[in-house]
Amino acid sequence: MMEDSKRFDVIIIGGSYAGLSAAMALGRSLKKVLIIDSGKPCNKQTPHSHNFITQDGLPPEQIAAAAKDQVLKYSTVTIHEDFVIGAAKAEDDFMISTQSGESFAASKLLFATGISDQMLDIKGFAECWGISVLHCPYCHGYEVKHQPMGVIANGDLGFEFSRLIYNWSKNLVLLTNGQSTLSLEQTERIKHHGIEIIEKEIVEIEHNQGYITNVVFKDGSKQKLSAVFAKVGFNQHSTLPEQLGCNINEQGFISVDDFQRTTISGIYAAGDNTTMFRAVSAATAAGTKAGAMINKELIEEAFS
């Protein structure tokens, strides 16, 4: 039997917005909760968070720090700074092991582990990611509105993304980073709106502390821009949900239902690891819902 100090009602793996929101809902429901967090949020380079009422324009780490302080006021919630390396089902509990050699047990698990972005192989791209190389116009478009902007994409994605970003700036170029794969109709529609299509290969993004000055092409020419929007691939930050049998959908996200339940009983997931809609507000909402649903399940089991 594991000692009581290491057994919890719920273990939350990941202590960013989704994890902290779930912990608050569970702490307010008098549940014993352990958050295990490695301190590596995917938006660590982003200087400001936007499109989140009451928090608009604040640095993400400031929002997270305030949330952590508030969550820890609930006496049944504990945060352990560590990295989870193992998880297994053992009878009625899930057993968790960490990099530091600790072991914990819980009736329910919540994965709020986020994702890891795969940077494009362009010099300067990673250094600008989240600062002036951006993924979401709803998070960052207003701050660069009407400025010279680029979209790095091609084909259908290039067309759709250009159409979207055009809402924030008519001073827009589409950078296909090589030969265009746009259809003739897409090309004509893009050009009709004054969007230049540049098919040159990109070799570098020149910048000043993450803020773009120029996009440099293989032929040595440059395009002066203030911001670039790009879609990149990603990996799940943790492979443990898949190892436990949770379904990963075709887009690479953990499959969850409307209540944040995965395909494995007792395991929940919330935040960027479950959806392409990446925003602090969305992660916060998903975490709150997950916490309430986990509490409901625990109550139903205890009241049988």
Image: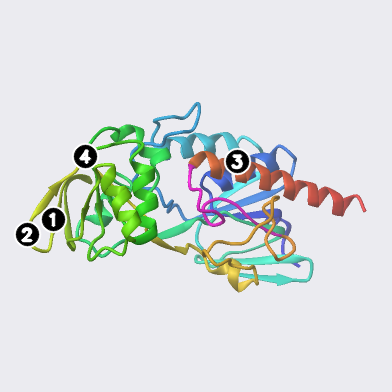
Please give the residue where the numbered disc 2 appears in the rendered image. 220
Q: Nearest the camera: 49 or 140? A: 140
Badge 1 vs badge 3, beta-carbon distance below 8 Å: no
For badge 2, the amino acid type reads: Gly
Residue marked by disc 4 = 148
Density class for disc 1 (Cα within 10 Å; few <14, some 14-19, many ≥20) is many
Instruction: Check disc 4 and give the amino acid type.
Output: Pro
From the viewer's perspective, tell me whether residue 296 is left or right of residue 110: right
Q: CA distance from mark 3 to mark 4?
A: 34 Å
Nearer the observer, disc 3 or disc 2?
Answer: 2
Residue 60 lies in what quarter of the image? Answer: top left
* Type of the residue with mark 1: Val
Spatial CA span between label 4 and label 2: 20 Å
Identify the secondary structure beneath mark 1: strand
Region in magenta: 267-279
| Residue occupied by mark 3 | 285
| Colouring scheme, one of rainbow, by chain, secondary structure, one colour | rainbow
- Could you tell me which secondary element the residue under label 2 belongs to? loop
Q: Is residue 101 left or right of residue 117?
A: right
Q: Could you give the CA–CA distance between mark 1 and mark 3, rounded to whole angstroms?
A: 40 Å
**Label 3 vs 2, first from the N-terminus:** 2
How far apart are labels 1 and 2 at the CA level? 6 Å
Q: Are marks 3 and 2 in contact (CB under 8 Å)?
A: no
Which of the 4 quarters of the picture holds residue 158? bottom left
In this view, the mark in front (4 or 1): 4
Q: Residue 77: x percent and y percent?
A: 64, 44
Q: Which residue is mark 1?
A: 216
Single out the residue that lies furthest toward the top: 54
Is tag 4's residue or tag 2's residue first in the polypeptide sequence?
Answer: 4
- Confirm or deny contact between disc 1 and disc 2 (CB under 8 A): yes
Tell me where residue 233 sits by quadrant.
bottom left
